[in-house]
Amino acid sequence: MRDLFTLPKVHLHVHLESTVRWDTLRDIGAANGVRVPDDIGTFGDFAAFFAQNDLVRACLRRPDDFRRVAYEFCQDEARQGTRYAEASFTAAAHGERLGDLDMPLTAVREGLAAGREAFGTEVRLLLDHSRRRSLDRAWRTLDLAKRHDDVVAVGLAGDESFPAGPFAAVFAAAREAGLHIVHHAGEGEGAVSIRQALDDRTERLGHGIRVLDDPDLVAEVRDRKIPLEVCPSSNVALGFAPSLAEHPLPRLRDAGLLVTVNTDIPALIGTPLAIEYTRVRDTFGYDDTVLAGLARNAVDASFAPASTKARLHEEINTWLTP
Ligand SMILES: [Zn+2]
């Protein structure tokens, strides 16, 4: 069994706001007059997750806060063997809240550039928009995505019981602008949310685990080779899977779907990417070839330049070579 920290990995589903180290949050909170508990505590459902998100949002205020979080993300991912990541960031929500639409995104990009320089982690951004929020904010999200170089995609996140339909024109305009589309779907809701995401021509499914509810949809997602960003520990922590052992990941693979392994909210659940791979190995008994295959799926599913993808495949080959 090879070391999964050294397996070259691509991380496709991770929310920057949910990667903040607790010590950093305490520092930033103290500087901004926000009380942060001594430790993260425990949480077991979506409501508690939203409360944690609110706390992070309340803390992040100054450009330095965003720069630090982005820089430390690069460092933490490098320690996990992540070579390339596409991180989600709710840029417009922070910008509106702080009265400066561009500041949070600009500062994050500066932090990522410094982090890449220091740690070699290549990170691009996906700007997400909560389905619960306004159409105006969705348009502002698109505007930001078009004006900032390191943004490769936009997509919907948040409570999937809210429909995607009202935002269809935003994503049509995003496609026209050359941006990729990645929606959260099939996490809390079933086939309907995945169907809506496909209507918007999502290029991956954020989660997508409930595709298994509908055999016809499984066939379509498989035939169209739409990758799934599967986040097993997050699904268990948020109550979307009863346990890791009962997680549908093996059934998704057996159905011929393109499965990738991700963390979603690593700091909140204490499961960074190499640990997530380790938990998948321990739970499902996969050998190194299967685990390398999961890493390869993420390379192929990414929006990385062809040269980066070729280099990552080479590095994975080297990892597998005895
Ligand atoms: Zn997510």
Image (cartoon, grey):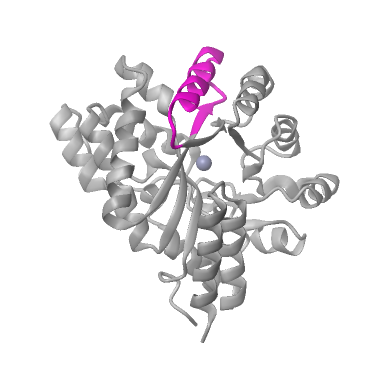
Name the residue at the front extreme. Answer: 307
Residue 111 horizontal/vertical position (percent) = 29, 41
Which residue is rendered at x = 26% and y = 46% of the image? Answer: 22
Q: How many marks?
A: 0
Residue extent of the magenta highlight: 127-150
Q: Position of residue 283 (x, y in %)?
A: 56, 70
Left or right side of 299 for 217: right
| Residue 7, image x, y percentages | 47, 70
Q: Is residue 83 magenta?
A: no
Residue 322 drawn above or below residue 261 = below
Residue lying at 39% horizontally and 41% vertically, measured from the top left: 16
Classify residue 182 by image quadrant: top right
Residue at 75% from the left image edge and 35% from the top image edge = 195
Q: Residue furthest bottom?
A: 322
Camera-nearest residue between 125 and 131: 125
Taking the image as drawn, is residue 39 in sight? no
Q: Residue at x 36, y 29 (%)?
A: 105
Is residue 131 within the magenta segment? yes
Instruction: Relative to 204, say whether 175 is above or below.
Output: above
Whether residue 215 is visible, yes or no, is yes
Kindly indicate the quadrant of the structure image that contains residue 121: bottom left
Q: Position of residue 3 (x, y in %)?
A: 43, 76
Examine the image and state in which quarter residue 107 appears. top left
Asked if 118 appears above or below 287 in the picture, the reply is above
